[in-house]
Image: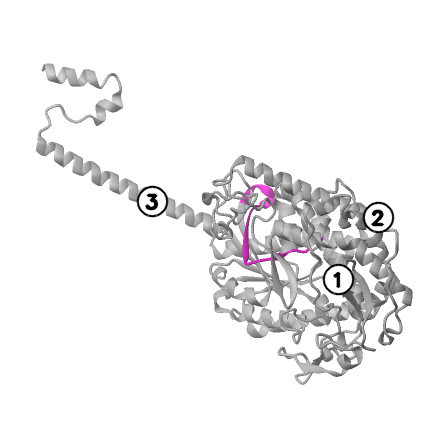
Amino acid sequence: MTAVLNNSDSQGDDPLSKMIAPPPNETLLERDKRLRLEAEAKRISDAIDEQLRVEAQKRRKSQEVKLLLLGQSGSGKSTLQKQFQLMYAPATLELERASWRHVVYINLIKSIRMMLNALEHEYDLEIDRESDLLLLVPSLSPSFTSSSSLSPTSASKATKSLPYQWDDPSASSPSIPSSAKGKGKERETTPTQEDFDSNSIWGSALKLSTPVTATAAAAGSSNFSPAWAQQIATLRLRLAPLLSMEDILAHKIGMGVQVAGKEEVFVRTGWQGIRTKKWSTASATKITAPEPEYIYSSRLSMGSGVSGLGFDTASTTSTEIQLEMDQRTELVRQVASLFMNSRGDVETLYSHQAVKSLIKKRKLRLEESSTYFLANLERISVSDYMPTDDDILHARLRTMGVVEHYFEVPVNGGSKMYGWRLYDVGGARGQRPTWVPYFEDATAIIFLAPISAFDQYLEEDQRTNRVDDSLQLFTLICSNPLLKNCHLVLFLNKTDVLQKKLEMGVKVKKYITSYGDRPNDYEHVSNYFLAHFKQVHRKNNLDTKRELYTHLTSVVDTRSTRQIIVNVRDAIFRDHLKESSML
């Protein structure tokens, strides 16, 4: 009796403890049986909890939209992703804003280099890199010919058959138009920190007062004014410090990759932050769900210690991070200073009659981003420059691999939020095989086709017209069995660039011969391309009931793109819920 009382007192006044306490006179056999029953009850309880967790996960997954942005390189996929970010996660873009200065600077420097290289190529000029100064001297040959480009006469005669069959099966497109590629000259030597001292050639180049001596171009370039050679030589020298910063900036945000003989900057997820020696691209490949407190996240493996800033927080000390931040701030300061001092020279180059002549003859084709940033050079060339939303949208940067973004998207007037996983893919031919693993369980695809590129050819294959490549790629998407249940949205993009080209008098039939004698205006041209993409969908659609949503777009135009995104969101989500038996 005393033992029982002691056991009761040990439980205190807690009724739950009294209820689950073992019987006071429990034998060993009874104890073993009780423990077995408790273990079985716990197993059943854990199984029920796991089943509930899996079912809840399935419900969340059924409500989550998996959206793929597909299309060739330069079609506007990353720009559309930025529009989604501006619309559904503007705060995250605000955090990245300062990092976009690097990209804007790279885009501008690349434009300057393209103009100088085009002048040297077209007007038969060469750089004498054996001397301490950069001099332009005429070639010894009376005329220049290159296997990398065709003269206007030969270009108009050469044709090739298009893999995609247009209206006329026997139609062919003209050969590659001549383009200002330069002569494959190497980049300027990257200056060291000491080079920026006032006593160095780099520091004094911007203050150059004595004109560089240069002679006129050879007879093969009769339209080239003799005075231009000296002017261009001087500009090349004065802009050399600025040109040399391209590699340094590119190293800070990504990596250089050769594409069709051209050096391009490719980036992976997290480039917006600091890159240190301990940054590992391999650690950024694991898909992770976003933290509950965030409405947007990039595809980063947070468990590995890699932060959204792009450096390894687990193995990088605060001192190293601060040092890297200081170095990056100093780099931006140096480049901003160079742009401030070189602004007049860049404006002189861009407005030079020789450059205008090449642009008019379409022997120099600056990218859309180039013309935009050159037009805004005065605003950009200040010490405290910070990119605007339009600057970020126009900034051109190539994506390496597949980058995942997560958004919480409101529906029904914002009464409920649903997760959208958006995948931005690299569109170059060599990267397209990496798309396939993401086809499974895809909810929808937005396919972007730049119809303004009817007069351009792939960098990877100068025999393939870019619009023709888009049609071939769209054919594969429509006919892929993995995507038969995927909603299709077609963006015929860069309509603003298309309109400008047509207004300049560029003839579509010169590049797409099947266009024939149709009117060379925006309405007829856009409807012609739209009809062909619809025809591809109709002939290759595995599900005859699957609808194709089509839009003529310019994704750099925020106002019109926002409305299109809303329409696409509603259409995709409505169909997605119907298939999930939720409507």
The answer to whether residue 415 is magenta is yes
Q: Of 72 and 190, which appears nearest the observer?
A: 190
Other residues around mark 1 within 10 Å, as few (<14) / some (14–19) / many (≥20): some
Q: In the image, residue 335 lies at what x, y percent? A: 73, 46
The answer to whether residue 465 is magenta is no
Closer to the camera: disc 2 or disc 1?
2
Mark earlier in primary sequence (2, 1): 1
Checking the image for residue 114, the label placed there is 1
Is residue 395 shown to the viewer in this render? no
Q: What residue does disc 3 label?
A: 50
* SS category of the residue bearing label 3: helix
Residue 266: quadrant of the picture: bottom right
Q: In the image, residue 461 lies at what x, y percent? A: 63, 73
**Magenta region, residue range:** 393-417
Specify whether 313 is left or right of 176: left
- Circle 1: residue type: Met
Quick check: 508 above or below 80? below
Residue at position x 44%, y 48% in the image: 59
Q: CA distance from mark 3 to mark 1?
A: 60 Å
Residue at position x 59%, y 42% in the image: 414
Q: Of 81 and 242, which appears nearest the observer?
A: 242
Q: In the image, residue 234 lies at what x, y percent? A: 84, 57
Is residue 256 shown to the viewer in this render? yes
How many numbered circles are shown? 3
Q: CA distance from mark 2 to mark 1?
A: 24 Å
Quick check: 391 above or below 318? below
Checking the image for residue 207, the label placed there is 2
* SS category of the residue bearing label 1: helix
Mark earlier in primary sequence (3, 1): 3
Q: CA distance from mark 2 to mark 3?
A: 73 Å
